[in-house]
Structure formats: C-alpha cells, structure tokens
C-alpha cells in the first residue's frame, strides 16, 4: 500500500517546547492551548503516539518556536526507532561541546556515528565501532557540534533524506542544494518554501517528520513501512479498550480485533477515525495514521431525526438512513440508531473524497466503569473516573453543571470528548434472574430485558435477591451501575407503546431502551395503549410488564412557541414534543412544525419537568396536523342480505403509498376517491374508531416552477412547507409514487394542504 493515499496532502504538525523531557507512556488525549484542532492536532497525535514529540508540561505547544540541533537529533533518533539504544551510547564523547553528561549526548552520538551495540566506551576512552544506521548528521569544521544552534532548513532536509537512505553521492551538487532538490523531487518538502539557511520552526520541522512517514525510501517502500507493518482501512472503534488479558488502553477496530499498544496510547480524539495502524512485530500499535482524503464534521445533537441531525443552532446535517453508523462499538445503520442519539451526544460525520457521507461515528464504546452520586451537587465520586478536572458534564444529554447532580444519578467518563455523562434513568421491576450467580452477577434480567452489570454495582446489588422488587440505576448506555430500594427511589421509565396485544407489548423508552413483555391486558383494553406514552414497571414473575398511561404532568400554563416556554418554564434543549388527536397515538413533532405562536393550556395534554425545572416532554392535542393519515378516501358501502337486513355498516378508510388504514364507521359525507386526512383512536374495544377529519384546501395547477425545492412550494406569495411524508398519487396510472416521480411525470400538479399545519400533504399528477 502507498501510505501517501492515507496522507493526501501536506501534514502540518507541531513540536513540543521541551523535547528533552522524558517520554511519558500511556498518555490519553492531549490538548494544547496554542493548537485549535484540525489537521495540526491530528498530526500531533500521530507523532506523540509514536514517541517523537511531547508537550512542554505547561499546556502549550509553541509551534512557531525554533528548534536546536540537539532537539532535532533527538527527534530523528526516536523516529529511527533507536530510543532504546540511547543509554549505552551516552558514555563517550565525540564532540568537546557534547560531553557524556549532556542531556542529548546519546541521541547525538547515534545520529552522528550510528548504534553502539557494545557495553560502553573502550578502556582508552575511544568510542567503540558503531553498528547499524549512521551518518545522518555531521559536526562543524571546527570539530564541534554546536548543539544549541538553531537548526536550518537545509540541515533538517539533509538529515531526513539520509534517513530515507540517500547519501551525498546520490544527490550531487553543492551541499545542501543537492539534498533540497532531491527532497523536492520525491515530495518530502511539498508545501514548504524556505531558504536553505532559514531557521526552521517547530511546526515546519514536524511537517517534515510527518511527510517522512509517507515518503518512499531510496530502495522503495515508505518510511513508515520501515518501522513496522501497516494495517490499512481500519476504523478505530475504541482507543481505551481492554485486551483479553486485561491490558488497558488497547485499540479496538471495526472488525472486533483488539491491539495492544507498544508504548503510548492512541489519542482519544482519534476514536471513530479511518486510517492505517502501524504495528510492530508483536502486533502492538506504534501509532495510528488517519486518512485525510475526505473530511469530517463534528455535531453535538440537539435533535436526531430520521434524515439527519440538528444541532443547537438549528443547522441540520443530512444523513441517509442506510448510512453505516458505528454506535457504541457496533456497526449498524443510521436508521437503526438515530432514535438513540440523545441531545448532547457527540456525533462525527465522515465524508469521502467525493463529499458524500461515508459513515457516522456516535457514542463512545460501552462504559466499563461508573459511579453513583451519593449527595446532591457532589462531584467527589467523579475523581474515581478521571484525573481531569476540566471535563464537561452532560446530564441526560443536556449540558449541565455540578449543581445539577442529584443523589442516585449515575456518571461515566467519555475519554474521546473529555465529558462526564450523567444519567438519572431508573427502572423498577421484579428481579427475575442473575448470571452467573446472585453473589456477583455480570448480567441480570428484569422486565424481560437482560442488563449488563458493572463491577461498581456489586455492593448495592448484593442487598437484593431474585424475587425482590428493585430499582436499577442505569448508565447512559443502559448498564447497571447500582440498585436501590423502590420505596426510596422511584422509576422514571417512560416511553411509547409501539405495538400491543393482550399478551405482548413493545415499549420504546425515551432513554433508548426497548422493553418487551406480557402486559396481561384484556383484548378489549389492549388497543387503547397503542401509540400512547406510558410508564413501565413489573411486579410479577416471568416477563410480565405493567403499563401505566401518562395522564398529567407537573407543568401548567400556555406554550409560548417563540420564547420556548410553558407557563414560564423553559424548554430543555433536548425536549421531546409530540402531537396527537384526542386519545389517539402520539407522533413526534418539532418546534418548526407548530404553526402558531402560542398553544393554549387546553391543547397541552402533558408536560413534564426535569431536575432543572425545564420542560423535557411535551404532548400537544391536535396542534400541528401531523397526527392525521393523509391520502385518498375509500368508502365501502353498507352490506345487506336478501331480505334487506343490514349485515355490515358502511366503512371508511384512507389509502396511500403505505396501503389502507383500518376501516372505521363514520358519519357525514365522504367522496369515494376524494383526498383528505383522517385521525384514528382506539376505543375501549379492539375496534378502531374515527377521531377527526382534517380540513383540507386544494391548490390547482401548481407548476413545477413554484417548487423552491422538495421542501416547500410558493403560490400567490404564500410559501407552504411540504410534509416529510407527503403522499403522491399518479391519477393516470392509479399508482402511489414518490415526489421526485410526481414532479418528473408532469409539469403541474394539484396540491392539498391541511388547514391546521398548512403543510402540503398530498400531491396529485395526471396527464
């Protein structure tokens, strides 16, 4: 493989201010006050893991500072992989100004003479004969090295070219111009336009070292391939994984392979990146080289939708549902994980060289440690998770502070974002099973769901036995961090019933969990739970679950849409808003879907506040028009027997591209084949009933030129948004089609918008 395909351009890297400092193993994410991220930060991470550079211990990197000859010699020797030979090459003197006690003596001796594999200096004081690489740097004609002189561009290029195998006889011309010309020809100095005698900055010197990794040697093969083996096209799923033998800071890639590190951990900022692992003969990671062909965009989720992510500023990043999504260490599709992307989640979207979304990386690998907060506002427990003190706190996906922490909250640490992730998710139920045993369970079953148990939960779990009622304290990724008495800690497991029958129900909890079990309902009562918001618990053996419909909240007052308040209480950043018609199923809506500036309290079915007195859940009653099903009316006449007795009442349903809705009894007049919208709700029996009809307005002969894009239409000075799930019908072929097909079929259409949300709901075309 040509590593230049990994680094497709000039890499800008910075150097440490104090290169003579000892190299520190197992260092995680390094942030420097004078590096703002991007390519510079990426490449600093590459060389830091390789051991070539370090920080100055004061938080700064000083990329514009200059390098001395001694500092550069040290970098070169480390890059050659010869750091281990420094000690045995420090006990003799080559230059009078670099005595054996000079901090860089071992590095300079190796750079000038090569590697001494003997035991030290000879009895007469002359250095032993060198073995291996030699001659990459020289002294001055006065017999000295001048270690503290600023190194020049010509000198640095000469050193690096010699590391690639070139000698004076290969480049010709007068020094250093022969080396400069050869370096330019093989791409080593791409992007640098410096005079031979110009002092070189730390950033430019590091740029050269980075280029060295991907530059071909004289005898073939990139310099990186000289140091080890390259494993290409890997995606780093976790840079703080645990190897099977218990070794920490291992690297896990997308196929599940775990690699130990040779010396230094891979920087946490590399999690999610695609590139090449450089490993030694023992299959240990020397460094990771990220792919720079494409680009990436980091997004903090404010709202995750089926077709993309909206950040706090309202900017949307579009993502197709089939896009590969690496979520919490597993490969899925975006369509499978978007509903789990809670507000505050850090998501990175990766684009290929053509500018198309290649994959999405979201959510850290599952937490392997957690703490339970013991008192309101306490951060004392967090020191067990990280030595950092400048972390960011997110609680339930919302930016928070220490004052927002509450007793029984669960905290984990995400190294990739230097963030404390706090969850207050609590589920109460019947303790059904434990594996491998109740004394030290690694997995327990409750509400028919298996939960992983973290070691931190062992002390509190030991107080409970199978058959007890217990409240589980869960991490953000749904692992058990602790257990509590249900009489002291109440469950807050709330979600939407997505399917239900008398003996089987499925609930998508707002925390991201899916709970399935037997609700033990009568057939007549089961249907009324479909699409409803419920609290889930369990009180009996087996997979029994109890569903409790949410009927009232802890917030009162009108909803001021512009001010984002309900009765004066602010909406949380990650607020979930739903709309429904009467007691029908809820549908998710956004602020932009609400067509009015103020929603009266009478149209608010439910509002829930969190610990910060912010509204986190809001259920509206028939405000947006999104809770209707739109399409074409289909009327089935009443059926009579031969004696004229009524056999079956007339039924009404609505047909669209998803098929036909259940038939319902109706009153009033509906034109068979007409277009409109219906809302349904479940009665006390299993029969579906009609809740309401959407009032519609028709726009005739709308030309294609009236479409601003696929999301809005402007007619007679009024702009109408197009519903995300717009129903499109080809009257000529009697087929339901896509919007793109409809616009391609005819240069004009008949549109229908609902009078409530004023969105285009139906598009009809014909010849």
Image (cartoon, grey):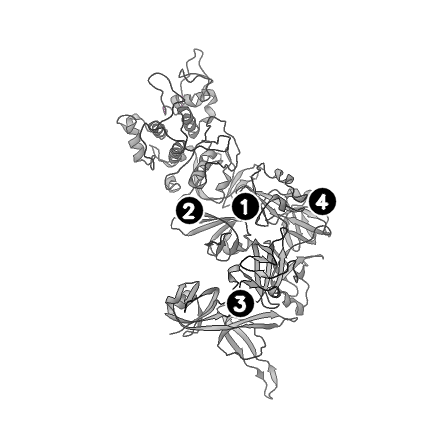
Q: Residue 527 is drawn in which quadrant?
A: bottom right
Marks 4, 2: nearer the viewer: 2
Q: Earlier in the sequence, mark 2 or mark 1?
A: 2
**Mark positioned earlier in the residue sequence (4 or 1):** 1
Residue highlighted by disc 2? 295
Say which quarter of the image contains residue 430. bottom right
> Depth-wise, is mark 3 or mark 4 nearer the camera?
3
Q: Which residue is mark 1?
A: 364
Query: Is residue 334 shown to the viewer in this render?
Result: yes
Q: Is residue 461 left or right of residue 700?
A: right
- Magenta range is 128-137
Secondary element under disc 1, as helix, strand or loop, is loop
> Which mark, residue 588?
none
On residue 462, which mark appears? 4
Foreground disc of the pair 2, 1 = 2
Q: Residues within 10 Å of mark 3 (few under 14, many from 20)?
A: many
Gap between marks 4 and 2, in whole Å? 49 Å
For disc 3, the marked residue is 625
Measure the C-alpha gap from mark 2 to mark 3. Answer: 39 Å
Q: Which image quarter holds the N terminus?
A: top left
**74 over 465 or under it: above or below:** above
Is residue 196 depicted above or below 190 in this figure? above
Helix, strand or loop: magenta stretch: loop
Q: Earlier in the sequence, mark 3 or mark 4?
A: 4
């Amino acid at each position: 493989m040509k590593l230049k395909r990994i680094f497709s351009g000039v890499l800008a890297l910075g150097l440490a201010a104090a290169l003579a400092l000892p190299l520190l193993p197992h260092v995680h994410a390094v942030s420097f006050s004078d590096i703002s991220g991007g390519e510079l930060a990426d490449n600093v991470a590459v060389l830091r893991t390789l051991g070539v550079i370090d920080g100055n211990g004061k938080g700064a990197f000083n990329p514009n500072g200059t390098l001395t000859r001694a500092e550069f010699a040290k970098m070169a020797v480390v890059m050659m992989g010869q750091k281990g030979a420094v000690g045995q090459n420090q006990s003799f003197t080559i230059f009078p100004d670099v005595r054996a006690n000079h901090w860089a003596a071992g590095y300079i001796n190796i750079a000038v003479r090569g590697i001494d594999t003997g035991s030290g200096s000879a009895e007469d004081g002359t250095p032993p004969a060198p073995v291996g690489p030699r001659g990459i740097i020289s002294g001055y004609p006065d017999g000295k090295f001048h270690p503290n002189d600023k190194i020049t561009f010509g000198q640095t290029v000469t050193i690096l070219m010699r590391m690639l195998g070139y000698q004076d006889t290969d480049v010709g011309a007068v020094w250093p111009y022969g080396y400069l010309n050869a370096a330019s020809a093989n791409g080593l100095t791409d992007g640098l336009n410096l005079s031979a005698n110009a002092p070189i900055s730390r950033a430019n010197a590091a740029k050269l070292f980075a280029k060295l990794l991907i530059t071909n040697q004289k005898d073939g093969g990139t310099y990186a391939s000289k140091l080890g083996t390259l494993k290409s096209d890997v995606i780093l799923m976790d840079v703080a994984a645990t190897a099977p033998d218990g070794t920490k800071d291992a690297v896990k890639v997308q196929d599940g392979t775990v690699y130990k590190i040779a010396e230094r951990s891979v920087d946490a900022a590399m999690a999610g990146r695609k590139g090449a692992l450089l490993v030694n003969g023992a299959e240990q990671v020397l460094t990771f080289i990220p792919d720079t062909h494409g680009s990436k965009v980091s997004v903090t989720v404010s709202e995750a939708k089926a077709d993309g992510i909206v950040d706090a500023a309202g900017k949307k990043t579009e993502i197709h549902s089939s896009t590969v999504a690496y979520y919490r260490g597993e490969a899925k599709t975006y369509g499978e994980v978007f509903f789990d992307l809670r507000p505050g989640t850090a998501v990175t979207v990766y684009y290929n060289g053509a500018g198309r979304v290649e994959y999405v990386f979201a959510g850290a690998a599952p937490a392997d440690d957690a703490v339970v907060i013991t008192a309101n506002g306490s951060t004392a427990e967090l020191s067990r998770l990280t030595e950092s003190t400048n972390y960011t706190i997110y609680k339930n996906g919302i930016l928070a502070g220490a004052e927002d922490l509450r007793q029984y909250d669960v905290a984990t640490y995400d190294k990739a974002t230097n963030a404390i992730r706090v969850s207050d998710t609590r589920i109460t139920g019947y303790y059904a099973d434990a594996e491998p045993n109740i004394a030290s369970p690694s997995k327990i079953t409750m509400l028919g769901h298996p939960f992983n148990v973290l070691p931190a939960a062992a002390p509190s779990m030991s107080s409970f036995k199978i058959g007890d009622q217990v409240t589980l304290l869960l991490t953000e990724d749904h692992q058990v961090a602790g257990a509590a008495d249900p009489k002291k800690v109440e469950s807050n497991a709330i979600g939407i019933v997505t399917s239900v029958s008398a003996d089987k129900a499925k609930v998508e909890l707002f925390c991201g969990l899916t709970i399935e079990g037997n609700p033990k309902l009568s057939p007549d009562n089961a249907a009324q739970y479909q699409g409803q918001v419920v609290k889930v618990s369990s009180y009996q053996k087996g997979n029994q679950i109890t569903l409790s419909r949410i009927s009232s909240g802890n917030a009162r007052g009108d909803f001021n849409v512009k001010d984002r308040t309900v009765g004066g209480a602010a909406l949380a950043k990650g607020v979930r808003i739903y709309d429904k018609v009467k007691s029908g199923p809820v549908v998710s809506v956004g602020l932009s879907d609400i067509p009015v500036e103020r929603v009266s309290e009478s149209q608010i079915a439910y509002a829930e506040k969190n610990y910060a007195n912010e509204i986190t859940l809001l259920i509206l009653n028939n405000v947006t028009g999104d809770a209707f099903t739109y399409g074409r009316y289909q009327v089935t006449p009443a059926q009579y027997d031969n004696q004229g007795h009524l056999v079956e009442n007339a039924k009404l349903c609505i047909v669209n591209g998803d098929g036909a809705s259940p038939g319902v009894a109706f009153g009033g007049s509906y034109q068979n084949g007409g277009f409109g919208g219906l809302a349904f709700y479940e009665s006390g029996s299993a029969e579906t009933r009609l809740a309401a009809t959407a009032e519609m307005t028709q726009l005739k002969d709308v030309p294609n030129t009236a479409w601003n894009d696929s999301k809005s239409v402007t007619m007679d000075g009024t702009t109408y948004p197009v519903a995300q799930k717009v129903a499109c019908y080809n009257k000529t072929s009697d087929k339901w089609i896509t919007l793109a097909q409809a616009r391609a079929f005819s240069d004009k259409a008949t549109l229908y918008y609902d009078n409530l949300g004023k969105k285009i709901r139906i598009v009809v075309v014909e010849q």
